[in-house]
Image (tube, grey):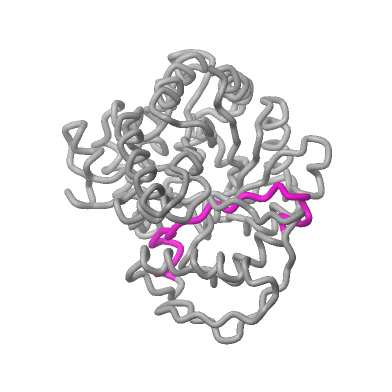
Amino acid sequence: MNGIKTGLMEPGVHPRIAPDLLLRNTRAHAVAGGADSMWLPDHLNSLLPASIWKPTYTGVAKLLPRADAFYEPWTALGYLAARNRLARMRLGVGVTDAGRRNPAVTAQAAATLHLLSRGRAIVGFGPGEREGNEPYGVDWSQPVGRFEEALATIRALWNSGGAPVTRDSKFFPLRDAVFDVPPHKGTRPPIWVAAHGPRMLRITGRYADAWFPSYAQTPKEYAEKLAVIRAAADTAGRDPQSVLPAAFFFVLTARTDTQVDEMINSIPARVFALSAPAPVWARHGVEHPLGPDFTGAQDLLPHTIDETTALDYADRVPPSLVREALLAGTPADILDQLAEWRDNGARYVVVGNLSAFHPRLSVGLASSLPLIQILRGMKRL
């Protein structure tokens, strides 16, 4: 079976040496691995506490000294679009925030990138996270309702043909709003929705071009949620197969099992497990430090966690939890895991490399070759 398309997520963090060092490096890996797309996150800050982002715990902090120095993704993707003429990869944002950005601005940014990249833009879209909203004065109540209205607003503007749009909305009312950025050869960027809960899954089935979840779950859960999406699409009068089943995974990979185990047991990898929701922790016999009902990445505020507290949390994380929250192993191991996701419906897989979490910078950097092997291997799944 040869049905898997691939993407590579760029960290999007400011490095030492040159501002575009990581952008060029990730692009080179994506080209070498035959990836179909390259992605950037939309974050103002990291999901890891900056308090533990030190060379003491991870070698890559020598190269990336500022854990929270994230680039604005649409600007960076525009930069990449100018350097994408030969590789011709799709360019995606994974995922942009419905609360922090007015949807008219998102519609404009995506339409612009789609034109400048000759029809290769992808809009990853989701409710966002508390850390990128609440600290900046953005209302974090009703994130799903806000997301649904933002999605409807983008569609209304894209479909307006330049005519003024008036639309009632609790969050984003339009009053003679004009949007006249034209489509590229009659097309708008596909919208990939990062959905996890029941309501978001139904929204995905009704409106999205692709489903793009990222938080920890099992392949069986993925298949069950995909069935919900397809049922919602059918109810809405859409072809249930028209919603592309995609997924995003962070990976820890190396040439040897020993190096993989060292990555899994690193402080950053164990602290990163805070992004997994409480039910995932419970599957491994431990309670999430932030409570038995904690939702994970969506409500995490990493900048409030000091070093001592982060280390205490790390001590509670069993290796099995890291292995569920991330794909971990040699390239052969990870391809075996991804084959199970393929068997449960996934047809487009985007990966982000967290192997630099290894305590030694040299081992983290050496993960480039295993990463390329994974990308190439996915094309053959």
**Residue drawn at x 36%, y 58% as measured from the top left:** 301
* The magenta segment: 113-135
Residue nearest the viewer, comparing 144 with 314: 144
The residue positioned farthest toward the front in the image shown: 237
- Give coordinates of residue 135: x percent, y percent: 42, 69
- Give coordinates of residue 28: x percent, y percent: 73, 32
Asked whether residue 299 appears in the rendered view, the answer is yes
Asked whether residue 51 appears in the rendered view, the answer is no
| 79 left or right of 138 in image | right
**181 is higher (above) or lower (below) than 307:** below
**214 is higher (above) or lower (below) than 262:** below
- Give coordinates of residue 144: x percent, y percent: 36, 63
- Give coordinates of residue 141: x percent, y percent: 33, 71
Q: Is residue 253 magenta?
A: no
**Residue drawn at x 52%, y 70% as measured from the top left:** 153
Examine the image and state in which quarter residue 72 appears. Answer: bottom right
Q: Is residue 133 magenta?
A: yes
Residue nearest the viewer, comparing 148 with 85: 148
Examine the image and state in which quarter residue 338 appears. Answer: top left
